Image (tube, helix red, strand yellow):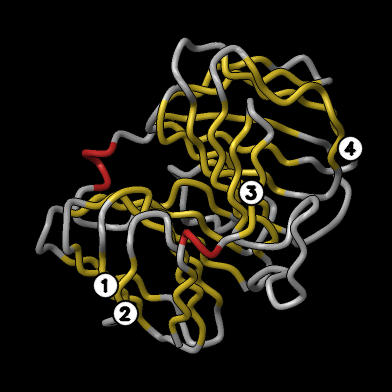
Amino acid sequence: MIERRPFGALGGADHGWLKAKHHFSFARYYDPDRMGHGALRVWNDDEIAPNTGFPPHPHADMEIITYVRQGAITHEDSLGHKGRTEVGDVQVMSAGSGIRHAEYNREDVPTRIFQIWIEPGRQGGKPSWGAKPFPKSDRSGRFVPLASGFAGDSDALPIRAEARVLGATLKAGDSAEYKLGSRRHGYLVPATGSIEVNGVHIDARDGAAISDEEVVKVKALEDAEIVLVDTA
């Protein structure tokens, strides 16, 4: 089953410095039918104004993945980690037993990100942070793990969940497949471009909630950049 969630129907908020759309219940947006999808708890589509950002705040027991679509994000945390993650790159913070962090747009242009939260397979543990570039050319025509809790995905950033975050870029007319498994949950969003997911039309920044599908087949109707989360 593929449930299309149009971008225009998502919850959201406009704080001036932050324009956010929420695929699931978050902050003041509450929908009892959209509390998550499998272990995926949050998917926010954020636009952060230049020279603004999220001041220090705490998290615990959550895997937080940031996919940068435009600009760059600068991370700082209570463990002393600092880093700038730019377009095409991914960062992962495993909040573990507890961490405080800040995320700033120190650029002169808006930064656009997907922020994805996945519930970990176990609570506690030492917090951690990491970032890595994932060139879009390496994802051409196929799904590539960007963050993963599976040992075989050695090139992906590690997360503490039985889950994957994958990326793909497709030229118009091209297709790619991912073996999800009928007992798994998938959630897919095209950052750019219109696509079909198992025959269902999905526009840029729409969500596709996937369940009871053994294989996910994506066909690009336009050049497309795609992010897919696979969870238990």
Quadrant where the image shows the C terminus = bottom right
Viewed as shown, does residue 136 lie left or right of 57?
left
Alpha carbon of mark 4 to alpha carbon of mark 1: how far?
Answer: 40 Å
Alpha carbon of mark 3 to alpha carbon of mark 4: how far?
Answer: 15 Å
Q: Nearer the viewer, mark 2 or mark 3?
A: 2
Give the amino acid at mark 1.
Glu
SS for callout 4: loop
Q: Nearer the viewer, mark 1 or mark 3?
A: 1
Q: What residue did someone put label 4 on? A: 98
Identify the residue at image location x=53%, y=41%: 157
SS for callout 1: strand
Instruction: Point out the tag, 4 or 2, that comes first from the N-terminus.
Output: 4
Q: Are marks 1 and 2 in contact (CB under 8 Å)?
A: yes
Tally the marks.
4
Alpha carbon of mark 4 to alpha carbon of mark 2: how far?
Answer: 40 Å
Give the amino acid at mark 3.
Ile
Identify the residue at image location x=73%, y=33%: 128
